Image (tube, rainbow, N blue to C red):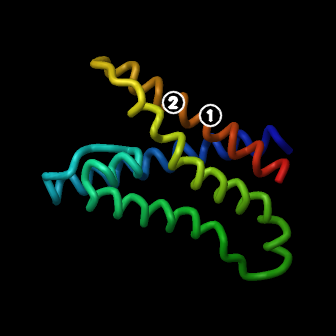
């Protein structure tokens, strides 16, 4: 069960990163004073409009996994909901990792993005398994 939760949480973390990047690019296109940032908390500090939009989208992505129509589906999807909630909440903290290291090299930043997605997936998958 742990391996499935970790694998799905890593995938969900990469999806969250992709969605945050697309949202940031759309905001940059329509509201030029914003900066391109995939970390919602850093975006909130650098450009509040972008940060608020990213936090709203993140909350919507997490809440999308919560409603379930029937009791049978609710029992089957309980673990999926836990993984989505833990991955979404811990994404806020782990997405700050590339901002902690300033480097002129794009390869390092991409590596840090991959690393925080893997760390976020491992952390949230373990939390969903044991709690």
Along the line of sight, the residue nearer the viewer: 72 or 49: 49
Disc 2 designates what residue?
114
- Bin the neighbour count of mark 1 within 10 Å (Cα to Cα): few under 14, some 14-19, many 20 and up: some
The mark closer to the camera, 1 or 2, is 1
Residue at horizontal 23%, vertical 46%? 35
Picture quadrant where residue 75 is located: bottom right
Residue 27 in percent (x, y) is at 24, 56
Q: Secondary structure at mark 1?
A: helix
Mark number, residue 119: 1
The answer to whether 69 is drawn above or below residue 63 in the figure is below
Residue at horizontal 79%, vertical 58%? 79
Is 88 positioned to the left or the right of 128 in the image?
left
Q: CA gap, disc 1 to disc 2?
A: 9 Å
Residue 95 in percent (x, y) is at 48, 41
The answer to whether 3 is drawn above or below residue 28 in the figure is above
The answer to whether 107 is drawn above or below residue 68 in the figure is above
Is 82 positioned to the left or the right of 45 in the image?
right
Residue 83 in percent (x, y) is at 70, 54
Mark number, residue 25: none
- Bin the neighbour count of mark 2 within 10 Å (Cα to Cα): few under 14, some 14-19, many 20 and up: some
Q: Quadrant for the N terminus, please.
A: top right
Residue at horizontal 51%, vertical 30%? 114
Is 22 positioned to the left or the right of 66 in the image?
left
Along the line of sight, the residue nearer the viewer: 99 or 88: 99
Along the line of sight, the residue nearer the viewer: 115 or 64: 115
Residue 105 in percent (x, y) is at 31, 17
The answer to whether 79 is drawn above or below residue 65 in the figure is above
Q: Quadrant for the C terminus, please.
A: bottom right
């Amino acid at each position: 069960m742990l391996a499935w939760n970790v694998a799905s949480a890593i995938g969900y973390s990469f999806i969250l990163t992709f969605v945050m990047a697309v949202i940031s690019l759309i905001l940059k296109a329509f509201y030029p004073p914003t900066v391109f940032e995939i970390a919602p908390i850093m975006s909130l500090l650098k450009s509040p409009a972008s940060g608020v939009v990213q936090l709203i989208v993140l909350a919507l992505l997490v809440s999308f996994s919560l409603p379930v129509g029937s009791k049978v589906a609710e029992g089957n999807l309980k673990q999926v909901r836990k993984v989505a909630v833990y991955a979404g909440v811990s994404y806020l903290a782990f997405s700050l990792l590339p901002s902690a290291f300033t480097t002129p090299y794009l390869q390092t930043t991409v590596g840090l993005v991959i690393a925080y997605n893997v760390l976020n997936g491992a952390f949230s998958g373990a939390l969903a398994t044991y709690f």
